[in-house]
Amino acid sequence: QVQLIESGGGLVQAGDSLRLSCEGSGRTFRPYRMGWFYQAPGKAREFVGSITWFGGVTRYADSVKGRFTISRDNAQNTVYLQLNSLKAEDTAVYYCAAGSRSYGEYEYWGQGTQVTVSS
C-alpha cells in the first residue's frame, strides 16, 4: 500500500514563501508522476502541477507558472512544492498525489496540508 504524507503548510503573509513536502512510502511506491493540487474553501480541487518521477519533467497550471516550482528527491521518495510570492488567493489545502501512468487519474492521495496566506 502506498502512503503519501504532506508537510510544510502554515500561516504566512502575502509575499512570503513556503516549501511543501510530500513523502511517499510503501513497497509498491514507484510512481510515474507526482502531482500537486489545491482546494480552496468552497471550491473544487484544482491542479497545481506535476513532475515525472524519473525524468523530472514538470508541468504547471497557468495560474502558478513563475511562482510555484515542483522538484523531487528520488532517494528520499519525496516531492516538493516551492510556493513563492504567495497571495491571499493561494489559501487552500494542498494535496500531493501519485500516479502510475502518464495519463488519467492519480491513484494515491495524501491527507493534505493547510496553507493560509494573510493579506
Image: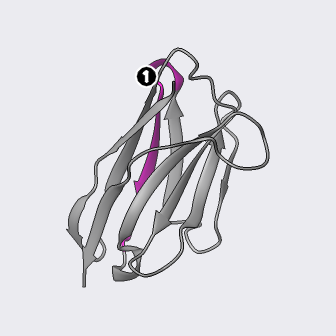
What amino acid is found at the position of numbered circle 1 in the picture?
A: Gln
Residue under the point 43% across and 22% down = 76
- Magenta range is 74-86
Whether residue 13 is visible here, answered yes or no, is yes
Which quadrant is home to the C terminus?
bottom left
Image location (x, y in percent) of residue 102: 78, 41
Q: Which residue is mark 1?
A: 76
41 lies left or right of 64: left
Identify which residue is drawn at 30% across, 61% down.
Answer: 114
Task: Indicate the quadrant where residue 116 lies.
Answer: bottom left
Q: Position of residue 53 (x, y in %)?
A: 64, 31
Residue most extreme to the right:
103
Q: Which percent across, then down, holds residue 88?
A: 33, 81
Residue beneath the point at 27% across and 74% down: 117
Which residue extends farthest top? Answer: 27
Q: Is residue 63 above or below residue 48?
A: below
Q: Which of these two is toward me, 26 or 9? A: 26
